[in-house]
Amino acid sequence: MPSRSSQQRARQAETAETAASLPSVAGALWPSLRDEAAQAAGERLLAPLMHQAILDRDGFDDSLAQLLGRKLGDAMIAPAAIAALAAETYRTEPDILEAGAADLRAVRERDPAAPDLATALLYFKGFQALQAHRVAHRLWVQHRRSLALHLQSRVSEIFGLDIHPAARIGRRVLIDHGTGIVIGETAVVDDDVSLLQGVTLGGTGKLTGDRHPKIRRGVLIGAGATVLGNIEIGEGAKIGAGSIVLEDVHPYTTVVGNPARVVGTRHVGMPALTMDQSLPPIDYMI
């Protein structure tokens, strides 16, 4: 009878083989990105950008790495060095690239201000900041923490978002607009979440350890909402704009106000995917 370790290795090999056989999200998006860039290059002033960013690149990995280098490089760490760091990350950890491609598709599907993939890739700082975070998080896990914090600082300076490199963020995440987003060190954001501008996922006081929110799949958090402490926002929940949330929110529940209170419940549906920010009729509250 095979040993437990040999069975585990067999399962891991089977999982890896299955993953390798799946179509690449990044590869699937690349032809569309090139077509969109070629069309945009018809605008004479944009042609150099479209060639440098997309048309002269070897693939989505090369394009995204060069973009992060161009955005985050400075006199201390050259753009080419940042681009090489990102490219090496994508080569050794292809899941990070695939997560970025899934994020880009999510932006295109959920944000009506994104007419195509190229627009989101080149101009949406919420998307760009999230991809920089993915590289910084990998550095953090590798205990290259000073470099991870440097990238965090550059993202904050350039994009106006502050995402700690230790924060764990899933796939198909939309950070809409991005301005003023703060995500703390021990925060967790699961797959298929949408965050609008000004959202804070913060701690409370000077507590140490696990002190930041856990945002579960399909959650939509409205503009300016503040979620504080080691609390859980359940799957499919909706948090209204400007709310202050200090306690757990049950799955498929809508909360609003300061302090936030329940104004509605559902049994199904992921508001992050529909971007439905409507609220049921409620009494006046602050």
Image (cartoon, rainbow, N blue to C red):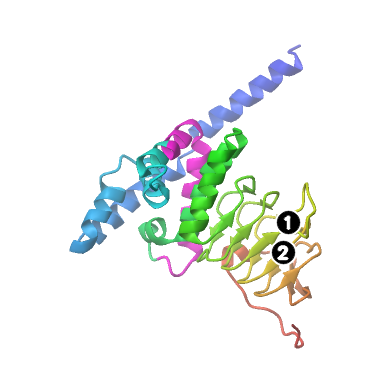
**x and y, in percent, of residue 219 in the image:** 66, 61
Q: Cβ–Cβ below 8 Å for labels 1 and 2?
A: yes
| 241 up-or-down from 174: above or below | below
**Left-right relation of 112 to 279:** left
Q: Which residues are magenta?
A: 85-114
Local SS, label 1: loop
Question: Pointer 2: what residue?
Answer: 227
Can you name the residue that lies furthest to the top here?
Answer: 1
**Left-right relation of 24 to 245:** left
Q: Is residue 270 visible?
A: no
Q: Residue at x 42, y 65 (%)?
A: 114
Q: Residue at x 46, y 48 (%)?
A: 101
The magenta stretch spans residue 241: no
> Picture quarter containing residue 263?
bottom right
Q: Amino acid at mark 1?
A: Pro
Mark sitting on residue 41? none
Q: Residue at x 72, y 85 (%)?
A: 281
Q: Amino acid at mark 2?
A: Val
Q: 111 or 152: which is nearer to us? A: 152
Question: Pointer 1: what residue?
Answer: 213
Main secondary structure found in the magenta portion? helix
Mark 2 nearby-residue class (10 Å; few <14, some 14–19, many ≥20): many
Q: Earlier in the sequence, mark 1 or mark 2?
A: 1
